[in-house]
């Protein structure tokens, strides 16, 4: 046994703890203070009710985030309208193609007139 | 005798949940002494202990549904709340930490005092000081275990539940706490004896 343990064994700590356990407090003023302070204090709504409806705070936050994303999308589409062609990836004909088509139509008309 | 005296904790908390303030007051009267005792033993400061207990009760009044009767006794849960509040308070408090040796030195009954006839009283005061100092030096978990079992007189099983540890772990904490406390008290007593010897030698 080490010196430290020897010294420790000299003291009967259980007896000491029991002997000195004489701290007593008058808490009546504290009790009164707590009761008075809470008398007019409203109770908070039970959080678990919302949790049951929405499946907890995580789902609630997820739905709120999804709603925000949807709102941003709608706002964007107002300022930058999206046509079905763009959505479907269809390319608009270039100016050269339009001119070529017009030329072909004119040639067709001349051809029909000659016939 | 109030009509609420006969009600147990579960019934009282049910009433508190429905906004019954008298039931809350009954719980306050029933348990403030116990919870204050634990807070005082943990913080070693009456005003701070009162603050902690008051805040805990106010929070309980605001959100009484936080206690789940299926999981633990009301007292077990509230002891846990008070201990956590004490630890939070200790962490937040920016106290000026004085040298423990100096605290002991100043709180000692002076050896040079003329009040020699009151040696027994001095000895008790000295033991109390040593014990308090030893408690202060204990790691938080050991101090909590000792406070709950020795001073709050909780059964070990409930104390283990309050601390969120197994019964074996609590027993181990208690053994280590007592060993450490005995060691501190013993070393302080030896230091005092040496000081008294030096005083006597100087007197000669």
Image (cartoon, coloured by chain):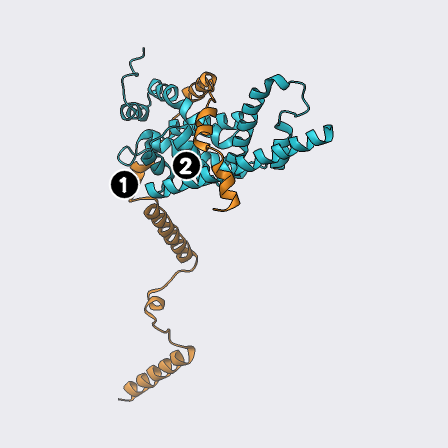
Chain colours: A orange, B cyan
Per the rendering, the mark at residue A96 is: none
Residue closest to the eye, A69 or B172: B172
The reply to whether the C-beta atoms of the residues labelled 2 and 1 are less than 8 Å apart is: no
User: Extreme front residue here?
Assistant: B204
Q: CA distance from mark 2 to mark 1?
A: 40 Å
Per the rendering, the mark at residue A53 is: 1
Dot 2 alpha-carbon crowd within 10 angstroms: few under 14, some 14 to 19, many 20 or more: many
Residue closest to the eye, B165 or B2: B165
Chain under callout 2: B
At horizontal 63% and vertical 19% (from top left) the residue drawn is: B116
Q: Position of residue B26 (x, y in %)?
A: 35, 19
Is disc 1 on the same chain as disc 2? Answer: no
At horizontal 54% and vertical 24% (from top left) the residue drawn is: B124
Secondary structure of residue under mark 1: helix
Residue closest to the eye, B5 or B161: B161
Q: Position of residue B25 (x, y in %)?
A: 37, 19
> Can see residue B161?
yes
Secondary structure of residue under mark 2: helix
The residue beneath circle 2 is B145
Quarter of the view holding residue A89:
bottom left
For residue B159, above or below residue A57: above
Dot 1 alpha-carbon crowd within 10 angstroms: few under 14, some 14 to 19, many 20 or more: few
Q: Position of residue B178 (x, y in %)?
A: 45, 37
Chain under callout 1: A
């Amino acid at each position: 046994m080490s010196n430290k343990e020897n010294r420790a064994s000299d003291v009967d700590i259980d007896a000491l703890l029991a002997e000195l356990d004489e701290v007593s407090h008058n808490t009546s003023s504290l009790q009164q203070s707590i009761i008075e302070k809470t008398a007019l204090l409203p109770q908070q709504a039970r959080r678990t009710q919302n949790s049951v409806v929405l499946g907890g705070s995580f789902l609630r936050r997820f739905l709120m985030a999804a709603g925000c994303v949807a709102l941003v999308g709608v706002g964007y589409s107002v300022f930058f309208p999206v046509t079905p062609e763009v959505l479907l990836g269809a390319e608009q004909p270039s100016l050269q193609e339009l001119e070529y088509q017009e030329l072909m139509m004119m040639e067709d008309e001349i051809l029909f007139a000659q016939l | 005798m109030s009509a609420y005296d006969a009600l147990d904790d579960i019934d009282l908390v049910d009433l508190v949940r429905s906004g019954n303030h008298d039931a809350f007051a009954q719980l306050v009267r029933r348990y403030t002494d116990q919870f204050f005792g634990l807070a005082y033993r943990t913080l070693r400061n009456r005003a701070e202990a009162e603050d902690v207990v008051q805040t805990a009760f106010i929070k309980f009044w605001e959100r009484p549904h936080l206690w789940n009767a299926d999981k633990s006794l009301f007292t077990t849960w509230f002891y846990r709340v008070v201990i956590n509040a004490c630890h939070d308070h200790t962490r937040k408090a920016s106290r000026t930490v004085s040298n423990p040796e100096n605290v002991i030195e100043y709180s000692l009954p002076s050896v040079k005092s003329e009040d020699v006839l009151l040696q027994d009283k001095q000895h008790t005061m000295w033991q109390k000081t040593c014990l308090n100092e030893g408690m202060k030096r204990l790691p938080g978990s050991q101090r909590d275990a000792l406070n709950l079992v020795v001073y709050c007189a909780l059964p070990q099983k409930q104390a283990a539940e309050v601390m969120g540890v197994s019964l074996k772990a609590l027993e181990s904490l208690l053994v280590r706490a007592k060993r450490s406390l005995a060691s501190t008290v013993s070393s302080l007593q030896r230091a005092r004896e040496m000081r008294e010897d030096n005083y006597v030698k100087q007197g000669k």
